[in-house]
Amino acid sequence: MSMRGLSGLAVIVVVGIGALLVFGRGGGVAPKPAAFAGTVLLDEALSRSAAEGRPVLVFATADWCGPCQSLKRGALASAKLEQTIRSSTIPVYADVTGDDAASMEAAQRLGVGSIPALILVWNGREVARHEGNAPAPAIEKWLDAALAAARSAS
């Protein structure tokens, strides 16, 4: 096989693996988690945070990210986690897929280098960060500890 043929085959394999990772387990792009429906931009959330006395929870995600889709279908679909997020935080959905400048700017400001990422911000400072996919009990435990850390930092 020629180098050109090998290069073409390599591209097909890479694209195939990427498609399998994103679309093979659960069927494409997962919907936005209910806890993040109707969320606001980072600057508005930070203003509301100060006024309402609740920390900001930023979820950095992307459509092309397989672990992000798994997190949205898994832990972030948990009713218990949704209730905690809605009652205890001001949620921000930062889709860094590439077509949302405000989300890209928020992710850059928060130093997001790995997705999925959940970042709890209190008084304008990051209190806690969770990167990667995890089951609901692990995310619930992380969020409970992060909220406790925010309360103690008050």
Image (tube, grey):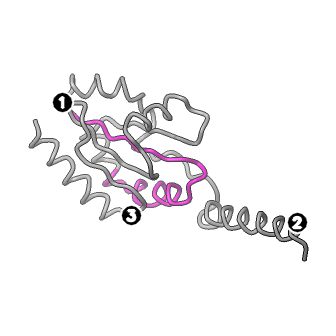
Marks 2 and 1 sit apart, C-alpha to C-alpha, by 60 Å
- According to the picture, the residue beneath numbered tag 1 turns out to be 53
Q: Residue at x 39, y 64 (%)?
A: 134
How many numbered discs sit on the rendered protein?
Answer: 3
Q: Position of residue 99 (x, y in %)?
A: 61, 34
Which amino acid type is marked by label 1? Gly
Q: Residue at x 31, y 35 (%)?
A: 90
SS at circle 3:
loop
- According to the picture, the residue beneath numbered tag 3 turns out to be 134
Magenta segment, which residues? 54-81
SS at circle 2:
helix
Q: Residue at x 18, y 30 (%)?
A: 53
Marks 3 and 1 sit apart, C-alpha to C-alpha, by 28 Å
Which amino acid type is marked by label 3? Ala
Marks 3 and 2 sit apart, C-alpha to C-alpha, by 40 Å
- State the residue in front, 67 or 112: 112
Q: Position of residue 115 (x, y in %)?
A: 46, 52
* Residue 142 among magenta residues: no
- According to the picture, the residue beneath numbered tag 2 turns out to be 4
Sooner in the amino-acid sequence: mark 2 or mark 1: 2
Image vertical order of residue 18 relative to residue 31, above or below: below
Q: Residue at x 11, y 40 (%)?
A: 153
Q: Position of residue 105 (x, y in %)?
A: 47, 31
Image vertical order of residue 59 relative to residue 54, above or below: below
Residue 51 in the figure: left or right of residue 31 = left
Image vertical order of residue 98 relative to residue 16, above or below: above
The reply to whether the C-beta atoms of the residues labelled 3 and 2 are less than 8 Å apart is no
User: Image quadrant for the C terminus?
Assistant: top left
Which amino acid type is marked by label 2? Arg
Of badges 3 and 2, nearer the viewer stands 2
